[in-house]
Amino acid sequence: MKRSPPRSPNERSRSPHGPLEILHGHRAVRAVLARRPGAVTRVGCAVGLRGELGAFQGEVQELSDAELSRIAGTDLHEGFVVEVAPPRYLPLAELGELLLRNRGVAVALDRVRNPYNVGAILQSAAFFGVDALLLGAPAPHPGLAPDAVRVAEGGAEHVALARTTDLADSLARLRERGVQIVGTHVTDAAPALGFAFVHPTVLVLGNEREGMSDRVRAACSACVKIEGRGAVESLNVAVAAGVLIAAAQSPRRTQGR
């Protein structure tokens, strides 16, 4: 007997780790099926697109565009939806161990909530080989929105995830373990291009409108800025993240990590 299609976001069942997630998007769904096939409970795709799911051997239901939109909660599903257990978020101690072991780079977001910005940052992080993304907010961070996962184009499955309710404290603890914490600021900061990044390092980006909080800035080892020609005051946070990640990863490439 055929299994029922994925439920809509309002009809979620639960896994041992919490409510199952409904994700959508071509590359996002393909990445989930490739990286975490055992976490997948249901898959749906548009009629005729089953062949685009690669080597996945599980059952896939072909659904109408209207049904896919209902399940995904958006018309921007790109023909694919999946019901899957939520990803594992690393405890802070494991995040520190990962960075120290790899002499790695992580990106920390201070109250950055726009899912399109978060998704674009994740895509850049995966492209440049960043080790982890740390989500920070005063209240429990909800994790990654489905739109962020779609915009990341599969990047959410290639970057370790962590989250904290007190980013300043978490950064201070990482700094105590020998991790360089580099914040971003439009003034009173060294130029990012040419800055002496020391690995392991965490790049901290602040809220799209307000920047980093004072407590988070105080937890940083240093602050950098991206210099422009002055026509506008600052870059979009996702664009800024891409520039900073590339700058921070450059020494790792030349030193072979």
Image (cartoon, rainbow, N blue to C red):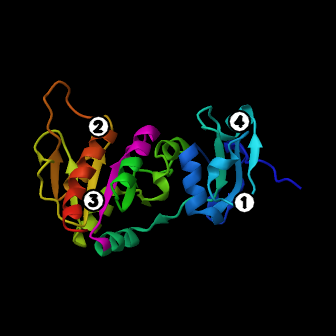
Residue 111, given in percent of the width and then of the height, sits at 37, 45
Q: In the image, what residue type sits under mark 4? A: Arg
Q: In the image, what residue type sits under mark 3? A: Val
**Spatial distance from mark 3 to mark 1, Cα to Cα?**
38 Å
- Residue found at the very far right of the displayed protein: 1
**Spatial distance from mark 2 to mark 3, Cα to Cα?**
20 Å
- Mark 1 or 2: in front is 1
According to the image, label 4 marks what residue?
70
Q: Earlier in the sequence, mark 1 or mark 4?
A: 1
User: Does the CB distance between marks 1 and 4 fall below 8 Å?
Assistant: no
Q: Earlier in the sequence, mark 1 or mark 2?
A: 1
**Spatial distance from mark 4 to mark 3, Cα to Cα?**
39 Å
Q: Quadrant of the N terminus?
A: bottom right
* Residue 254 visible from this viewpoint: yes
What is the secondary structure assignment of the residue under circle 4?
helix
Q: In the image, what residue type sits under mark 1? A: Gly
Residue 112, given in percent of the width and then of the height, sits at 38, 43
The structure residue drawn at horizontal position 67% and vertical position 49%, both measured from the top left corner, is 51
- Mark 1 or 4: in front is 1
According to the image, label 2 marks what residue?
210
**Is 140 left, or right, of 52 in this rendering?**
left
Q: Earlier in the sequence, mark 4 or mark 3?
A: 4
According to the image, label 3 marks what residue?
202
Res. 58 mark: 1
Q: Quadrant of residue 33?
A: bottom right
**Spatial distance from mark 2 to mark 4, Cα to Cα?**
35 Å
